[in-house]
Image: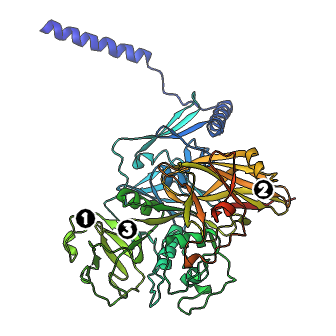
């Protein structure tokens, strides 16, 4: 044993001597200007390579169109992503405040940022330093993602050899919290009172639209103007629905500010111009809880309908608990009242309802019966209510009034019905006459069902319907839900001065037999329908074209947007 211990001691001694003999003295190495220059050049080259348009960008392995979502690598070599990408592809809630504050949320995680700062408060309990600052360029907000992506269940991966950047999804992704209330984040406008008029639909539509602009921008829009200055044959007490709201907004008839057209005087100013332009609205035709919650979380409040026997604040109903401000209807009546869903609570006890539903959970809804109703104007509607959210609308893209210079349209009534050839795909086209010095920037149309695919074409030298065969492809894409969509062109198309041009769309809606949205005179509400204001065509394969006005007594819903060209 002593011999073994002696050997071990000897070995330690040899190692110690070797270390002392070979140890380098402490030195301070100063980087030369040449080294700094080379490092800076390498860094610049790498940044340019990563920012090149040829670099492939993917989220969870799926290609991302860099025309639709802007991304770049900062001077600090950090991936900067546009906030719309976080909402659309990473399912985050992005709230931007007018003081420069930014709140990002997903699942149970929350990250608070400030424009121009590199500090982030995570889950209200600790601060981390980002490698780049949050950047605001024009209307676009860019978030440095490297440090915080894992809070949203993604990791940034670079592959320089393959010219590829990927946001890799991590296991255990949680999309939504168990409860969420837009009131907690300044995302609602004041509760209003419709009084004795049948304007709940307008209050719900504009209430939802207002939330789409919050918290960065607070507006109160005129319900008088929406209910009295749309293209339908209705007065302020006739009621309405979401298709009328979308048509009014999509046609640039509104919205206007409440201060310019106050509510309840039964007078409306026809000369007022829209202060915002609707660009996109999703129509969710089923009670898909995850989809509805995600829409509220990411985009804004949801406009929907319920059935109620009550008509005003002091009304009573066996389905309504005044004590708990809760409502649950389990009968067979169809919806007759619109309201706005601003949040949810999965744990809201079913015992809070006068009639006990089969499970817990409630939508938090903003009503239009004044602040004395319910919980200061809000009501908790059971997840199990037979009508709530069976059909819902959320406004996902709202532009300023100068987003485009001019709108070309023939469908002021919007989507009234469908047309097609008993197949899930079809072509449709509208012909317009351009003004002087214009370029086509975007088109808009309706997707009449889920998972719609589309291709957009343009004819700049239109002579007659045979010209539609010579269409030029400009862009393709898809939509996940039914709704109204504006499609920006990757490159503007210069139009011939004072000459006819055509916009052509090929559409494919799975399961549909009439996938084209049309405007036509369906009943007394649509008596203002004008069949003389358009030149629209439909086709099955894009070769033989039929006049929509002559053969179907309808206008196709297809708008075009142009900008003036500076000479």
- Tag 3: Cα neighbours inside 10 Å, few (<14), some, or many (≥20)? many
Q: Spot the residue most to the right.
A: 567
Task: Answer with mark 3 or mark 2, whichever residue precedes in sequence.
Answer: 3
Residue 485 location, x and y as percent? 58, 58
CA gap between label 1 and label 3 equals: 13 Å
Compute the Cα span from label 3 to label 2: 45 Å
Contact, CB < 8 Å: mark 1 with mark 3? no
Q: Quarter of the image for the C terminus: give it.
A: bottom right
Q: In this view, does 434 lie above or below 355?
A: above
Q: In front here: 405 or 245?
A: 245
Of badges 2 and 1, the one in the foreground is 2
Q: Is residue 6 above or below residue 549?
A: above
Compare marks 2 and 1 and give the one earlier in the sequence: 1
Which percent across, then down, holds residue 563?
Answer: 76, 61
Per the image, label 3 sits on a secondary structure element best described as strand
Query: What kind of element bears circle 2?
Result: strand
Q: How far apart are marks 2 and 1 (CA)?
A: 56 Å
Q: What element carries label 1?
A: loop
Judge left or right: residue 378 versus residue 155: left
Q: Which residue is drawn at 36% across and 78% down?
A: 378
Look at mark 2 in the image and give the residue it sits on: 501
Q: Please identify, in this view, whether the residue under mark 3 or under mark 2 is nearer the observer.
A: 2
The disc placed on residue 343 is: 3
Q: Quadrant of residue 391?
A: bottom left
**The image quarter in which residue 327 lies:** bottom left
Residue 106 is tagged as: none
- Residue at 81% across, 58% down: 500
């Amino acid at each position: 044993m002593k011999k073994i211990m002696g050997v071990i001691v000897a070995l330690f001694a040899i190692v110690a001597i070797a270390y002392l003999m070979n140890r380098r003295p402490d030195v301070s190495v100063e980087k030369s200007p040449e080294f700094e220059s080379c490092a800076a050049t390498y860094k610049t080259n790498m940044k340019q390579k990563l920012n090149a348009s040829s670099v492939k960008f993917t989220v969870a392995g799926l290609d991302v169109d860099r025309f639709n979502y802007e991304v770049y690598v900062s001077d600090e070599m950090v991936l900067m992503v546009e906030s719309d990408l976080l909402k659309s592809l990473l399912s985050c809630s992005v709230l931007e405040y007018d003081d420069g504050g930014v709140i990002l949320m997903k699942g149970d995680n929350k990250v608070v940022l400030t424009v121009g700062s590199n500090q982030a408060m995570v889950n209200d309990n600790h601060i981390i330093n980002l490698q780049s600052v949050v950047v605001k360029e024009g209307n676009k907000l860019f978030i440095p993602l490297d440090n915080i992506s894992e809070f949203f269940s993604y990791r940034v991966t670079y592959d320089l050899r393959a010219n590829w950047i990927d946001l890799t999804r991590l296991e255990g992704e949680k999309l939504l919290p168990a409860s969420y209330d837009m009131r907690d984040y300044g995302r609602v406008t004041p509760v209003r009172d419709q009084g004795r008029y049948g304007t709940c639909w307008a209050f719900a539509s504009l209430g939802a639209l207002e939330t789409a602009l919050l918290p960065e921008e607070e507006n109160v829009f005129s319900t008088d103007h929406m209910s009295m200055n749309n293209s339908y044959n209705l007065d302020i007490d006739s009621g309405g629905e979401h298709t009328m709201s979308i048509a009014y907004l999509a046609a640039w008839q509104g919205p206007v500010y409440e201060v310019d057209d106050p509510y309840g005087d039964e007078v409306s100013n026809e000369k007022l111009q829209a202060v915002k332009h609707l660009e996109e609205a999703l129509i969710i035709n089923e009670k898909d809880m995850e989809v509805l919650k995600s829409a509220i979380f990411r985009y804004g409040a949801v406009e929907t309908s319920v059935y109620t026997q009550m008509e005003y604040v002091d009304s009573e109903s066996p389905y309504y608990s005044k004590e708990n401000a809760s409502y649950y209807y389990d009968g067979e009546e169809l919806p007759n009242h619109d309201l706005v869903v601003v949040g949810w609570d999965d744990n809201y006890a079913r015992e809070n309802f006068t009639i006990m539903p089969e499970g817990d959970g409630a939508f938090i809804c903003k009503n239009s019966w004044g602040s004395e109703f319910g919980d200061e104007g809000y009501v908790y509607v059971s997840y199990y209510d037979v009508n709530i959210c069976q059909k819902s609308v959320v406004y996902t893209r709202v532009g300023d009034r100068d987003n485009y210079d001019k709108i070309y349209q023939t469908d002021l009534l919007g989507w009234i019905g469908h047309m097609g050839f008993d197949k899930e795909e079809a072509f449709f086209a509208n012909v317009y006459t351009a003004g002087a010095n214009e370029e086509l920037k975007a088109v808009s149309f309706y997707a009449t069902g889920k998972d719609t695919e589309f291709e957009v074409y343009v004819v700049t030298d239109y002579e007659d319907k045979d010209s539609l065969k010579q269409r030029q492809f400009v862009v393709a894409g898809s939509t996940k839900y039914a709704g109204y969509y504006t499609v920006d062109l990757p490159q503007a198309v210069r139009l011939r001065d004072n000459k006819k041009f055509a916009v052509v769309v090929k559409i494919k809606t799975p399961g549909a037999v009439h996938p084209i949205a049309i405007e036509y005179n369906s009943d007394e509400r649509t008596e203002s329908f004008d069949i003389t204001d358009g030149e629209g065509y439909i086709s099955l394969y894009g070769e033989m074209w039929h006049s929509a006005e002559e053969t179907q007594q309808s206008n196709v819903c297809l708008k075009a947007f142009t900008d003036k060209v500076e000479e």
